[in-house]
Amino acid sequence: EAGSLAKAPKAPPGGAASSTRGPQGTFAAYAKEMEKLSFTQATEEILDLARDTNDLIQKSEPWKLLKQGKTAEAAWVFDHALKCLDAICVALSPFLPTRMQSLWEQLGRKGSVLDVRLDSSGALSLPPVDQVGEPSPLFAKREDVEKTRDSFLTEVKAAGEGNGKPASTKSGGAITYDGFMTTELRVGRIVEAVPVPKAKKLLQLQVDLGELGRRQIVAGIALHYKPEEVVGRKVVIVANLEPAKLMGVESQGMLLAAEAEDGKLSLVDPGPEAKVGVRVK
């Protein structure tokens, strides 16, 4: 019950599994990797927490503890698992904003998960929930995905045979022309640039897109450009990315840059005649 969880002990009683990873230590490792823009390793830290949380529930079997009258032990397991799920939800929200918002609401939380911030100690300070929401799957089952894939490939093959052209399934990461055209590249001009606090590699930019207005973009170029060096420059951005938060700052697009063999980044320059706001084709 919610009341029991709110009063759950801070340490696991004797019968509950005690060798489990907590959210605060995970957040410290996650923040370190995010600051380095090591997104794969950052998400791996959170997935490790998810695995540990699942192991805790499987090994502790809190439903059995409740039947045995071990309410305090069961309450600790549920309380710890919910705190871990809160942390997982917040940490993965920049990568999976829609699905993590769904999980956030299932956990009984209000508002947007993207607005949640860590406190000064690097931990989440959230009030206990009165009641969790109705659970629903966040992802389709593998067999359902495979059925959808097979159906899609069948339709593609039939379409290719029907118009005398080969089916448009390509290997090696190739995409179709139509697929590329769904990416909206625009010319912009950087009008403001400031460092992102506690992030050595990030700059927070305001980019003018002409009639389309301004966009705030967080870019990992701080080791290659000083803020004053990019203000006034024309750049090419991906303008139709879903907004995401990096180190707590919302980014509404992505800059294009070329990387040299030594890792040096060079912003893509559309040229002096390119008008701000026009689409790059």
Image (spheres, rainbow, N blue to C red):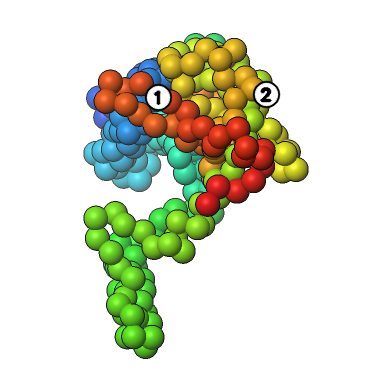
Count the labels in the image: 2
> Going 59% across and 12% down the picture, which residue do you hit?
228
Q: Nearer the viewer, residue 9 or 268?
A: 268
Residue 54 position (above or below residue 23) = below
Instruction: Please indicate, yes or no, whether residue 254 appears anywhere in the rendered image.
Output: yes
Mark closer to the chain start, 2 or 1: 2
- x and y, in percent, of residue 103 in the image: 50, 46
Residue 25 rendering spot, x and y as whole percentages: 36, 19
Give left or right: position of 8 versus 249.
Answer: left
Residue on which the image places disc 2: 191
Q: Is residue 172 above or below residue 232?
A: below
Image point 36% across, 59% down: which residue? Answer: 175
* Label 1: which secondary element: strand
Task: Give residue 264's quadrant in the image.
Answer: top left
Q: Which mark is residue 265?
A: 1
Q: Secondary structure at mark 2?
A: strand
> What's the amino acid at mark 1?
Leu
Mark 2: few/some/many CA within 10 Å (<14, 14-19, 20+) = some
Residue at point 35% right, 77% down? 156
What type is the residue that disc 2 sits on?
Val
Q: Dot 1, crowdedness within 10 Å: few (<14), some or many (≥20)?
A: some
Is any part of residue 22 visible from this angle?
no
Does residue 9 sit above or below 279 in this rendering? above
